[in-house]
Amino acid sequence: MSTAISIIGGVGLFLLGMSVMTAGLKGLAGSGLSNAAATPLRGAFWGGVATLLVQSSSATTMTTIGLVSAGLLTFPQGLGLVFGANVGTTGTGWLIALIGASRTIDGVTLLAGYHTAYNVVGVLVLLPLIDQFTRFVERILPERTSALTRCLDPAALATPIAAVEAVRRTVARALIAVCRSLDNALQAASRGEAVRSGKDAISVPEAAEALRQAQTFMSDVSGPPESDDEQRRLTSTLHALEHASRLAEAAGEKAELTALNAGPDDVRASRLCADAMRSAVAAAREVAAPGTGDDRDTPVEGQRVAHELPGAETFDPAAAPAEQALMQLEQCAKTLDELQSAHRSATLSAVASGALTGGEAIARVDAVRRLDAFAHHAWRSAAHLVGRA
C-alpha cells in the first residue's frame, strides 16, 4: 500500500513540476525565444536546452506551435526548435541510465546512447535542409485558410502573448484589405467609373468577418497578460481592433462616392483620404508579416502575405518605414478633419445662395464626412498597431 502511495505521490509531484516548468517556458518564449531562435541552428540549441529543463519535448513543441501560429516565430525557426526538442528529449533516458536505473555501462546505458545518436543524426541530416523542407511541405500541404485569419490558430490561445500577437496581425491584415479596397473605390470614383468586381468587391466583407473572428478569438484567451508590457500590448491591440472594425463598418455602407468630383474641396478630400489609405497600408504592413530576427522572410508568410490579401493585384504602395508612413497618415487624417469642417460650412451656405440644392449639399457633406471617418479610423488603428498611439 505504501509503495502505491509513493508512486502516486511521485507522479503527482512530477506532473506539478511539469506544469510549473511549462508555464515558465511559455513566459520565456514570449519574451526572448524568438530572438534566441534567430537562426535554425540557434533554435535547435535552445529547443534542446528548453526541453532538458522542462523534461518534455511535447511542452516545447506545443509552445512552439502556438508561437508559429501567432507569427512570433517563422516556420524555419519553429522547425529549429522542434529539432532541438527532439534531441533534448533524450536527456530523460540519460537521467534514468546514469542516475536512476543503472550506474554502469550496460544495456540501459546503451539504449540511452542509441536513442540520442538516432535523434542527433536525424537532426544533423535535416537541419541544413530546412528551407528545402519548408518548400516541400508547402507543396504537399498548401495553405487553404484565409490570408486574413491564418494567424487565429487555437494553439496560440494557451499563451496569452501569442494570442494577442495573432489578433494583432489579423487586425493589420484586415486593415490593409479595407484600405486597399477604399483606395481602389476612390480611384474609380475620381475617374467616374464603377468599382470593378472580383476580389476588391469582397475584401471589405471578408475583412469585417475576420475582425469579428478576432474578437471571438480574444475572448477565448487563457488568462491575463503577466507583465506590464504585455498588458499595454493587449490594450493597444484592442484599440486597434475597435478602430479597424469601425473602419470596416463604415466602408461597408452602401453609399456612392461620385459626389467627390463636384468641387475642388471635394477632390482634395478624396485625394487626402486615398493618401491616408496608402499610408495605413504601409504602416500596417510590417505588423501583418513582421520579421523575427532573420533577414530572410519565411516562405509561408513574408513572401506571400502582401500579394494574398484582397486587392493586392491593383495596389502597390511605395515601400516606406512604418514610422514615416504613420506620420504621413496622421497628417492626412488631421488635414482632412479640418477640411471637413470648413467644407461642411461652405457647402451648406451654398444652398442659401442657390448654388446647390439641399439634396446635393447633403450628399457632398456626407461624402466628405465618410472620408474623414475613413482616415481617422485608419490612423488610430495603425497607430495602436505600431505602438505609437
Image (tube, rainbow, N blue to C red):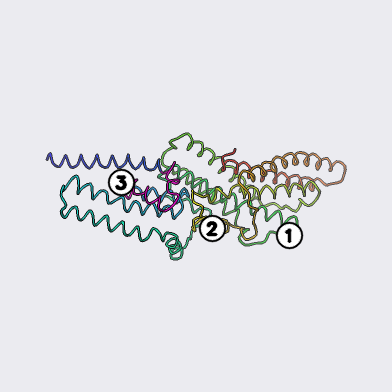
Locate residue 126 relative to residue 305 in the image: left or right: left
Locate residue 169 relative to residue 140 in the image: left or right: right
Locate residue 380 relative to residue 130 in the image: left or right: right
Residue shown at 19%/41% (left/top)? 8
Say the numbered circle drawn on residue 193: 1
Could you tell me how far apart the alpha carbons at marks 2 and 1 are, in whole angstroms? Answer: 32 Å
Residue 203 placement (x, y as % from top left): 60, 56
Q: Most extreme residue toward the right, as rendered? A: 353
Q: Is residue 380 magenta?
A: no
Please, what is the three-letter code of the amino acid marked with disc 2?
A: Gln
Residue stretch rendered in magenta on the structure: 29-58
Residue under label 2:
303
Contact between labelled residues 1 and 2, with CB atoms less than 8 Å apart: no
Q: Most extreme residue toward the front, as rendered? A: 105
Q: Main secondary structure of the magenta part?
A: helix
For the N terminus, give its image quadrant: top left
Examine the rendered structure and indicate whether residue 341 appears above or below residue 46. above
Residue 373 placement (x, y as % from top left): 67, 43
Image quadrant in which you'd find residue 133: bottom left
